[in-house]
């Protein structure tokens, strides 16, 4: 079998290594809860400022820097409505974001 010296794919594009930071951050998706459309993304919280923390609006318990969690915001009202949830709290949350 002949090896590929230039590491191009069979479609002609150059090989791009997987960006693990982007994988950890998660893919932005849309979810609808009680008729409200939310933009949702998971995050590791690793890139936050050193003393940064958030309070989950569902359980009112702190989410500390480096803790995996979900960030959600109202797709219509925009990113100003962004809130940080524990992953399990987001699954249980039925909205709306205030």
Image (spheres, rainbow, N blue to C red):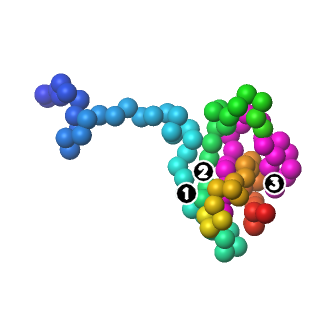
Give the residue at mark 2. 41
From the top left corner, tell me how far across and down residue 64 is, in percent.
77, 36
Give the residue at mark 1. 29
Quadrant holding the C terminus: bottom right
The local crowd at label 1, few if under 14, some if 14 to 19, many if 20 or more residues have their Cα within 10 Å, is few
Pointer 2 with pointer 1, Cβ within 8 A: yes
In this rendering, would 12 be left or right of 25?
left
Asked whether 35 or 98 is in front, the reply is: 98
Residue at (64%, 38%) from the top-left corner? 44
Residue at (25%, 35%) from the top-left corner? 14
**Residue 44 to residue 59: above or below:** above
How many numbered discs, if any? 3
Residue at (71%, 36%) from the top-left corner? 67
Give the residue at mark 3. 57
Quadrant holding the N terminus: top left
In this rendering, would 62 be left or right of 41?
right
From the top left corner, tell me how far across and down residue 50 is, in percent.
73, 28
Residue 88 visible in the snapshot: no
Name the secondary structure under disc 2. strand
From the top left corner, tell me how far across and down residue 54 is, in percent.
78, 43
Name the secondary structure under disc 3. loop
Labels 3 and 1: the sequence-earlier one: 1
From the top left corner, tell me how far across and down residue 47 is, in percent.
63, 33
Write down the region rendered in magenta.
54-74
Residue 12 visible in the snapshot: yes
Q: Distance between the residues labelled 2 and 1?
A: 6 Å
Among all residues in the image, which is located at the extreme right? 60
**Residue 59 to residue 18: above or below:** below
Among all residues in the image, which is located at the extreme bottom? 35
Name the secondary structure under disc 1. strand
């Amino acid at each position: 079998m002949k090896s590929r010296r230039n590491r191009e794919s069979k479609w002609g594009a150059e090989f791009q290594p997987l960006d693990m930071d982007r994988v950890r951050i998660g893919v932005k998706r849309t979810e609808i809860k009680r008729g409200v459309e939310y933009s949702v993304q998971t995050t590791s919280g690793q890139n936050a400022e050193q003393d940064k923390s958030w309070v989950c609006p569902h359980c009112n318990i702190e989410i500390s820097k480096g803790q995996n969690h979900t960030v959600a915001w109202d797709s219509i009202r925009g990113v100003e409505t962004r809130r940080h949830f524990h992953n399990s709290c987001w699954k249980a949350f039925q909205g709306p974001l205030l």
